[in-house]
Image: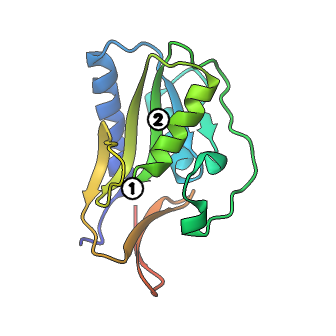
Amino acid sequence: MSDNINVNSLLNEMAIAIESHSSSHHYTAPLMIGIKTGGAWIAKQLHQKLGYKDPLGVLNIAFYRDDFSTLGMHPEVSPSQLPVDVDDRHIILVDDVLHTGRTIRAAMNEIFDYGRPASITLVVLVDRSGRELPIQADIIGKTMLLNEGEHVKLLGPEPLTLSIDKAGSTGNKITG
């Protein structure tokens, strides 16, 4: 796997893909929402590049996860921030890494608790193997095939870098 992944270049390509997708689907003023933490970092960068007028939304999906007991996760208690109504809005949902699909399922559950969007477009920086749910991204910065026991993680917020961790190691940074 290359250690020369430029996160900023991926973000530029993703912004162009979002513009194209929004134009071809006739979305006017889509609402961008990032999934805390890494997805919110990515969404903040994309939101600025695209010049969206509505404030950026941030979801904390901790209480919507169905796998705390298996992951040993401890939810950080903080509210989501959806500054505008989601009803009949085209949502651009942003996350850092798409793996099992459970984070995205949890995010969509929370969004629907706030209202009924017209559509949801999923944007991810990294798509990796290991899906457990039938969820796929519409816009992908980079697809990675990782070996068993390897994990990719976004580090940031400044600078944004990717790290590949192997079970029992500290990981290799991939700068951006």
Q: What is the secondary structure assignment of the residue under circle 2?
A: strand
Instruction: Say if mark 2 contacts mark 1, CB within 8 Å.
Output: no
Per the image, the residue denoted by label 2 is 93
In the rendered view of the protein, which quadrant contains the N terminus? Answer: bottom left
Give percent across and percent down for residue 144.
Answer: 27, 61
Instruction: Name above or below for residue 91 compared with residue 36.
Output: above
Relative placement, left or right, of 58 versus 129 is right
Indicate the amino acid at tag 2.
Leu
Q: Which mark is residue 100?
A: 1
Q: Nearer the viewer, mark 2 or mark 1?
A: 1
Indicate the amino acid at tag 1.
Thr
Give percent across and percent down for residue 13.
Answer: 30, 41
Nearer-N-terminus badge (2/1): 2
Q: What is the secondary structure assignment of the residue under circle 1?
A: loop
Residue drawn 46% across the image and 40% down it: 94
Q: Is residue 137 visible?
A: yes
Give percent across and percent down for residue 96.
Answer: 45, 52
In the rendered view of the protein, which quadrant contains the C terminus? Answer: bottom left
Give percent across and percent down for residue 93.
Answer: 47, 35
The residue carrying pointer 2 sits among few (fewer than 14), some (14 to 19) or many (20 or more) residues within 10 Å by Cα, namely: many
Q: Is residue 13 visible?
A: no
Q: Looking at the image, which residue sits at the far bottom?
A: 168
Residue drawn 59% across the image and 35% down it: 110
Q: Quadrant of residue 118?
A: top left
Residue drawn 56% across the image and 45% down it: 40
Q: Nearer the viewer, residue 175 or 143?
A: 143
Relative placement, left or right, of 77 versus 3 is right
Instruction: Name above or below for residue 58 compared with residue 156.
Output: above
